[in-house]
Amino acid sequence: MYFRKLYTLVFLRNDTHILLGLKKRGFGVDKWNGFGGKVEINETIIDAAIRELKEESCVVVKKCNLKNIGHLEFTFEGDPTMMDVRVYSASIFEGAPTETDEMSPKWFAYTEIPFQDMWPDDIIWFPFMLKGSC
Ligand SMILES: Nc1ncnc2c1[nH]c(=O)n2[C@H]1C[C@H](O)[C@@H](COP(=O)(O)OP(=O)(O)OP(=O)(O)O)O1
C-alpha cells in the first residue's frame, strides 16, 4: 500500500528542441529534468505547475498554454510514498529561461537529449513524448 504525493513536471518545447534544467541541489541533483515539484496544500495541480516552472526557470506560462501530456508514478524500494507526477508541456510562454538556485536551464535538440545524465526511466518514455504520441 502506497501513500500518493502529487508532483508536477513541465517541459517547454518547440518542434526541434526541449528545455531541460540541471538540478543544482536536493532530490535528483546533477540530473537534467523538466521543471516541477511538490503540489502544496490548497494549491491546484496546474497552479503548482506554473509556480514551480517560474521558481525554477523564471519562465511564466499561462494555464491555457499548458497541455497535460502524461501521468507518471514513481516508487522507491522501502519507501511507502508513491510520487504521482502530472506532466505538462508548453510551447508558448513569457520570459527567457534563467538560472536559479535550483536549476540551470538549457535547450537540447531532440536528437541530443542527455539521457546518461537523467533519471534512468526517462529514456523509456521521452521518445513517446517527443514524438507527440502522449
Ligand atoms: N524518474 C523521474 N523522471 C523524471 N522526473 C522525475 C523522476 N522522478 C522525479 O521525482 N521526477 C520529478 C518530479 C518532480 O518534478 C521533481 C522532484 O521534485 P522536487 O525537486 O523533489 O520537488 P520540490 O518541491 O521542488 O522540492 P524542494 O523545493 O522541497 O527541494 O522530479
Image (cartoon, rainbow, N blue to C red):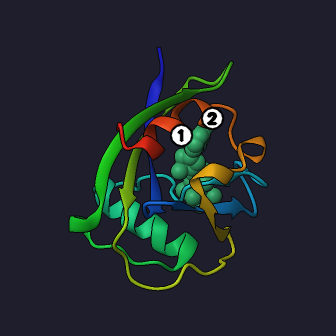
Q: Residue at x 72, y 50 (%)?
A: 114
**Identity, as a three-letter code, of the amino acid under mark 1:** Phe
Q: Tags 1 and 2 in contact by the CB under 8 Å rule?
A: yes
Picture quadrant where residue 70 is located: top left
Say which quadrant the C terminus sits in.
Answer: top left
- Disc 2 residue crowd, few under 14, some 14–19, many 20+, Cα 10 Å: some
- Residue 49 sits above or below residue 83 on the image: below
Q: Which disc, if any, is residue 123?
A: 2
In percent of width and height, residue 90 lies at 36, 63
Q: Which disc, if any, is residue 126?
A: 1
| Residue 124 in sight | yes
In percent of width and height, residue 102 lies at 67, 68
Nearer to the camera, 107 or 111: 111
Disc 1 secondary structure class: helix
Q: Which residue is drawn at 69% across and 33% down?
A: 120
| Residue 43 in sight | no
**Identity, as a three-letter code, of the amino acid under mark 2:** Ile
Q: Which disc, if any, is residue 104?
A: none
Disc 2 secondary structure class: helix
In percent of width and height, residue 60 lies at 39, 78
Whole-Å distance between the Cαs marked 1 and 2? 6 Å
In percent of width and height, residue 6 lies at 42, 42
Nearer to the camera, 37 or 18: 18
Horizontal placement of 43 versus 111: left or right? left
In the image, farthest residue toward the top: 1
In the image, farthest residue toward the left: 64
Q: Residue at x 65, y 25 (%)?
A: 76
Horizontal placement of 86 versus 83: left or right? left
